[in-house]
Every structure is written in C-alpha cells, then in structure tokens.
Image (tube, rainbow, N blue to C red):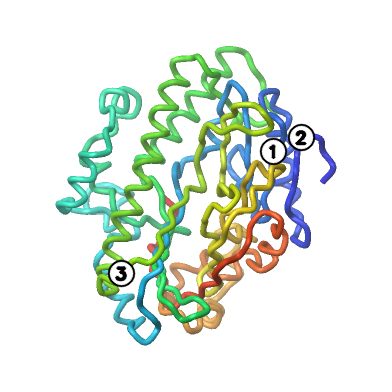
Amino acid sequence: MEHEKIRTWTDGLPVDEKAMAQVRNTAALPFVWPHVALMADYHFGLGATVGSVVPTIGAIVPAAVGVDIGCGMSSVLTDLTADDINPRDLYEKISAAIPHGRTNNGQAGDVGAWKDAPGDVHDAWGKLDVDLDLVDRHLKLQHPFAEQQLGTLGTGNHFIEVSLDEQHRVWAVLHSGSRGPGNRIGTYFIGKAKEAMKRWHITLPDPDLAYLPEGEQLFNDYWATVQWAQRYAKTNRALMMDRVLEAIGDPTAIQEIDCHHNYVACERHFGKDLFVTRKGAVSAKLGEWSIIPGSMGAKTFIVQGKGNRESLTSCSHGAGRAMSRTAARKTFTVADHVKATEGVVCDKSAGVLDETPGAYKDIDAVMKAQEDLVEVVHTLRQVVSVKGEGEAR
C-alpha cells in the first residue's frame, strides 16, 4: 500500500478493506512515528489492527496493546524423539495437568482456574512483585482471582501442543497470556483513555484509538500495570511449560524460546526512543529467536529475526484469522474439522470449530510474504493440541 506512514508485508494475501481502513486511522494519529508496520497476518481488531506494529512518541493507545496483555509463545526443544512419546496419552496427561476452558463466566468454580493454587503457583505469584495498592486502586483486582488463573491456559486461540521437527525431535509449544487480570487491566484503561478524550474534547476517527499522554498520572499507572501484566503472562507460560514437560516425562531441555506478541516496550528506532506497541506481532531483531504458529493441524515455525529496520524489527505472530469466529462456526462442519486435523490428537468437537484450520490464513503464504523479516530454522508439525472452549481470555 502506498502511504507515507504505513509499511506492509502482505503480498499474495487477501486484502481486508475493513482492517486497512483501521490501519489508516491509526497511522494518522499525530504521535505515531515514523510509520505503522503491517504484518502478513493482519486482521481487524479493537481500535488497532491485529498484526500491526505501532511506534509512538509521548503517548500510548491502550487498545493497541489490547486486553490480552503479554500474550505470546513459549517452546522447548527436548532430547526426545517421536518414538519416545504416545500422543493420545500425552493429550490426556496435559489436559488433566493444566486448567483450560472457561465456565461460570470465569467466576467461582471456573474449570479454567485453580480451585486452590498449587505450591509452585503460589510461590510464583509471590515473586511477581505486584503493587497491590496500585492495581486495586484501579481494578479492584482481588488477590485470589489473579493467583488462581496463574499457570492456566484460557480459551480461544490459546493452546498447548506437542510437535515434531524435521528430525522427528519433540518440541513442547504453548500460547497464552495474562488471562483475566490482563483483560481487566486492558479494559479498564481503554475506558479511562476514552473518558480522557471526552474531558479534553478530542474527537478521533475511532473512539477505541483513545490514548494516554506521557506525563499524566494515568499514563504512569497504565505503564506500571501493563508491565506487571506482561511479567504475569511470561510467568503464566513458564508454569504451564513445567507441567507440559513433566507430562512428557521430564526430558532434557535443549533450547527454550519465549516471546510476547501483544505488548508495549521502550525501543530505539531510526535514532529516536519510542514506545513500540506490537499487537499480534513479534520482535525480530537480528538473530533473535521467535515462534510463529499456524493453526490446529498446520505448521509452526521456529525462526530467527533478520532485523529489518522498516518493520521496526518485527514479524507476524501467526497465521492470522481469515474469518470471524461466528463465520467459522457457520462455515465449517465437524466433519470438515476432523479432516483438517487428521493426524493430530485434539478436540474434534463442534466446540472448537471457530479454531479449525480453515478459519485461518495459509501459514505458508504468510511466511512467504515476510521472507525479508525472518529466517525459518525449524518447521514443526503438531501431534497433540490441547485447547479450551470459549472466547479467548
């Protein structure tokens, strides 16, 4: 696309006009500099487009960070091979070891949370150094709620997988974020930013692009809580990975990778210090390792960044949705899903039709469109995929 404040990596992929209009709105914000980088897996999101990198000076858009703050990927290459595992057995063990899904609207008795947090979860919570006064002042974030969701998967596109690479080596791969606590933080500050726009009589092309200016107390509070949520998300993934490896048989870890893809960080680009928000995008500095998953039944790529300056050293975070969850449920049948996930031990029911491979873009086309952003080191295929039913949280 020709636009002085937008760079795209979307060649060979369908054009989403609704999302492109959203990108133009974001790029037009006066504090966005030098340009928005649009990744190959882009699709329409709340306020800012999923699959976009938004660099800003002096302000942050909470909706660009989103509500699943710190969502990202973890992977571990083990010393095991395909002959050492039983996929059906692993599916059962992992499903039993890690809470997933969502019931009771996330309240008491939710299957996706711990009834009583195990010792390692309790200890990890204690080390998160949460400023409870700050968090509670804004969010009324009760201690048990946050602790009971730590080390749990959630729903929607979050997953735990066991995969094999080209040498049939076993990898543990998982995708999750800051769960309910991050959702509360994001939702709260998006609302506060909108209130600020009304108070200052600022009209935006999209109300969800409401922003918090640096120097305001609300900005400082947001920055502190969003950084905490990103630490929570990373801890969440680490606790789950420990349980996945235990289910596999406590193998030796040869390589470990962890990367956020919904977050904001201070970075220097083009000679300036910026707030860089990646909403459905991954840091891809030169030589930096990251993980780009496809969908259930598709491939996952272990990559190294090429440090492309124009992309603000970023790459896509996955395949990206090709259609909404509602459209997917109307389009695909259980028979379609069973065929698409052949060879993968996973949920084959109607409850995950919104996550069936056909609901996502072709991951090979996505990778081709960003050949100048990353180098593929390993290509994985899933043999186990554990998901929880319900909306992503």
Residue at the image position 59 percent from the left and 21 percent from the top: 58
Q: Earlier in the sequence, mark 2 or mark 1?
A: 2
CB within 8 Å, label 2 to label 1: yes
**Mark 2: amino acid:** Lys
Of 342 and 37, nearer the camera is: 37
Secondary structure of the residue carrying tag 1 is strand
Residue occupying the point 50% across, 83% down = 342
Tell me if residue 243 can be seen: yes
According to the picture, the residue beneath numbered tag 3 turns out to be 252
Q: Secondary structure at mark 3?
A: loop
Task: Work out how far the residue at label 2 is from the one at label 1, CA to CA, in angstroms.
Answer: 6 Å
In the picture shown, does residue 221 fall above or below 119?
above
Image-quadrant location for residue 324? bottom right
- Whether residue 53 sits left or right of residue 117 in the image: it is right
Q: Residues within 10 Å of mark 1 (few under 14, many from 20)?
A: many
In which quadrant of the rendered view does residue 220 lie?
A: top left
How many C-alpha atoms fall within 10 Å of the one at disc 2: few (<14), some, or many (≥20)?
some
**Picture quadrant of residue 92:** bottom left
Mark nearest the camera among 2 and 3 is 3
Mark 2 highlights which residue? Answer: 5
Place of residue 365 in the rendered image (x, y in percent of width and height, measured from the top left): 70, 66
Identify the residue position indicated by label 1 in the image. Answer: 36
Q: Nearer the viewer, mark 3 or mark 1?
A: 3
What whole-number distance in Å separates the C-alpha atoms at marks 3 and 1? 41 Å
Front in this rendered view, residue 382 or 307: 307
